[in-house]
Image: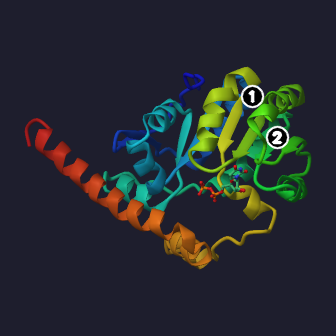
Amino acid sequence: MEPSPSVQVALLRLNILGLPIDAGSRKEAVDAVFGALSGGDRMAIVTINAEMAMAARLDPKLAAIIRGAGLVLPDGSGVVWAARRRGVRVKKIAGVDFIHEIAEQCVEAGRGMFLLGAGPGVADEAGRFLTARHPGLAIVGMADGYFSPEAEPELCARIREARPGALLVALGVPRQEYWIADHQQELDVPVCMGIGGSLDVLSGRVRRAPAWMVAAHLEWLFRLIKEPWRWRRMATALPAFVVAALAAERQERYTEPGR
Ligand code: UDP
């Protein structure tokens, strides 16, 4: 199925390894979310890191989804590094932090939020945390992420009936991106975002890296220590991303006229 059309937001957009990365301010991104929530345009939000960028090189469907997304937020030290090498002072926007911005905009626009994904009970705990942090936020529905293909039509009907302004999908990359692309249009939800393991973090079941590690761009190391099975994926993706980004830069320098 073709990815759902998503309104493209006029932010400063960089091209890194053939993929867009929005390098505008956090405020611009937040305003874009409010615009979609209040205006009814559909917007898919992708948070990209080096692992996802490398996965997209081998996965044309994922690459097309990223290219068609309304917002592509830099959610990793690797992509921030690559953007800064182009002279743009990009700031990392972690998906788990941006959820709070979306929650605030939902309150502002008078729209509800639907949480889909993670293990049984996790969305419920995450939802309670979000409503405590954002007075006035309505969680209009929840479902865990371990549903069968047969249960999907009923799940979609539930989401449609709940009429959320924002749907957060925690099914892991790339399944959550595929799911949003395949369903956003029929669900008619203005703002959809793939959020990986964020519901586990918001529920308090998984700890986030301490602030000093985040500031030192070492969140990946914390994750690696806590979830060592990621070692192989991360150990190959980040260096491969750096090599590919440097090679692409060199290529651009040689093909740029007058240099
Ligand atoms: N998950 C899910 N259904 C599945 C597979 C995974 O709901 O069939 C959830 C899982 O419980 C976790 C999230 O998807 O909450 C994926 O988190 P992870 O940190 O692995 O995300 P990624 O690294 O892909 O961003």
Where does residue 37 sit, x and y in percent of width and height?
A: 74, 31
Work out whether 32 lies above or below 87: above
Q: Residue at x 62, y 76 (%)?
A: 226
Q: Which residue is labeled 2 in the image?
A: 114
Where does residue 88 sit, x and y in percent of width and height?
A: 38, 51
Q: Residue at x 52, y 57 (%)?
A: 92
Q: Hey, what amino acid is under mark 2?
A: Phe
Asked which secondary structure carries label 2, the reply is strand
Work out whether 224 lies above or below 49: below
Q: Pick the quarter of the image with the C terminus.
A: top left
| Left or right of 194, for residue 146 | right
Residue 156 occupies quadrant? top right
Q: Which mark is residue 189?
A: 1
Q: Hey, what amino acid is under mark 1?
A: Val
Tell me which image quadrant ligand 1 sits in.
bottom right
Mark 1 to mark 2 CA distance (whole Å): 10 Å
Asked which secondary structure carries label 1, the reply is loop
Judging depth in this view, the residue of 119 and 244 nearest the camera is 119
Where does residue 75 sit, x and y in percent of width and height?
A: 53, 55
| Left or right of 247, for residue 8 | right
Q: Residue at x 77, y 61 (%)?
A: 202
| Left or right of 73, for residue 133 | right
Judging depth in this view, the residue of 130 and 27 nearest the camera is 130
Check mark 2 vs ligand 1: CB closer than 8 Å? yes or no.
no
Q: Is residue 29 visible?
A: no
